[in-house]
Image (spheres, grey):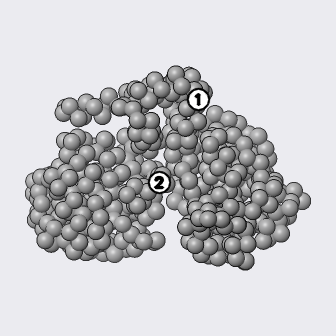
Amino acid sequence: MITLVIGGSAGGTVALRRFLPRLSSQFDGAIIVMSHLGPGGGDLLVNGLRNICGLPVRLAMEREPVERGVIHIAPEGYHLLIEYSRRFSYSVDERVSFSRPSIDVLFASAARVYRKELVGLVLSGANADGAEGLRIIRRLGGKALVQDPREAEMQAMPLAAVSHAGCDLCAPVATLADYINNDMD
Amino acid sequence: MTPDDASVDLEEIEIDLFIEAMLRRYGYDFRDYGRASLTRRVLNLTRRFGVRNISELTAQVLHTPQRLEEVISGLSVPVSEFFRDPLTFRALKTQVFPFLASFPQITIWQAGCAHGEEVYSLAILLTEAGLYPRCRIFATDMSQQALVEARKGIVPLGDIRQASSRYLESGGGRSLSQYFHARYDLAKFDEKLIENVTFARHNLATDGVFCEAHLVLCRNVMIYFNDQLQRRALQLFAETLVRSGFLCIGDRENLHVHADVPFEHADKTLPIYRLRRAVDAP
């Protein structure tokens, strides 16, 4: 069983809208999505994805369990971390590379908990968030997927991820979804 | 298991030992802090101290008590911002101030005040509501460094513009600039705002009730606690509050894991709770 953590920034929403609906509704791992959004963005993203995904979409709530077969969306304004009890915790610690939430913080904490049962995915974005987190995921035995920079609206984040962490598969999101559906479960 | 897996497992042991050292040497209890954030903060401290690993940090802490305050500061409530979550401040003003106004003397406890951003924010709104002269405010934190900073009330001028717009969204009735003096690139808040504020050390993990209050604010502090410590803090607040007193927490904090906490939502859309009236015995 795998857990999938996804990070995106500018252009990430478009990629998410292409990627998430392609996941099989039979997918029984947990999915955690973090995108850099403005105020109210977490709820907006939940509403935007709810009707197009086969899996249920919910905001990742403080202290609530990470649930299998659910797409959890990170709120804006807080770092999101995973506890060993496989529940979400929030933090308002200082921004990391100007970001809160920080994809690196989420990826690093998930990597410690899930180790080789974790898959990290970095999507379109205009900064380098997620690259260090993806490196830690790989170090601890997890897999790293990156959206093909040629497909991404903003290439900086996928490029930074590949150059800093390397990856197991760098491809358009449709291919990445097929990979998750066919090879991971 | 990969060597890197093993190194993370080793880190977990080192964090346990660090926690044990803090407890036995200085009485600071971090055992019931959420592990994910605590791990980040401890690892940040190793960088700040320029040591190679957590064990070296632990050794420094054990043998260099003069650096204890730095460690506590690194492990405590982070800096907030003025009028963070303006709608909550607006609700304090409209829904909680009328209750406060019904008492001749008002006591407020801000638990985990960090650098005082929320104490000053609240003091401003209380001043504008004409309630401040009747208020006694306890602003507590486990970090002495934080309390020193909070007393100073100095913030970078760059933070003020956004603070001003949040102040207005919070229902502030004047201009925020009336409350501070700018010098170079810093703003120092008016000391009148802390005339009725007592800054004191208090640790939610180990200390007890010290006052009777009409309002307790503890925003984004319990997010760093596990369920057990969260419950302890809530119990402390319940014992501190007068009947029907108010508790204000962070906008996205979750108290629902405890079915038995004696608080009820004052307004479902806001992080403002009310101490439930004692239920009469059957």
Query: In this rendering, which labeled residue sits more in front, label 1 or label 2?
Result: 1
The residue located at (70%, 62%) in the rendering is: B189
Instruction: Check disc 1 and report its element: helix, strand or loop.
Output: helix
Residue B16 location (% of width, % of height): 43, 28
Q: Say which amino acid is labelled 1.
A: Gln
Quarter assignment of residue B15: top left
Residue B24 location (% of width, % of height): 56, 22
Residue A118, above or below B58: below
Q: Chain of mark 2?
A: A
In the displayed structure, does residue A106 sit left or right of residue B71? left
The residue located at (31%, 41%) in the rendering is: A112
Q: Chain of mark 1?
A: B
Instruction: Check disc 2 and report its element: helix, strand or loop.
Output: loop
Residue A8, above or below A144: below
The residue located at (48%, 26%) in the rendering is: B60
Residue A129, above or below B16: below
Residue A85 location (% of width, % of height): 39, 41
Residue B63, above or below B124: above
Identify the disc placed on residue A98.
none
Residue of label 1: B66
Quarter assignment of residue B80: bottom right
Quarter assignment of residue B26: top right
How many residues crowd around disc 2 within 10 Å: few (fewer than 14), some, or many (20 or more)?
some
Q: Say which amino acid is labelled 2.
A: Glu
In the displayed structure, does residue B108 sit left or right of residue A149? right
The residue located at (58%, 36%) in the rendering is: B69
Residue of label 2: A94
Q: Is residue B140 visible?
A: yes
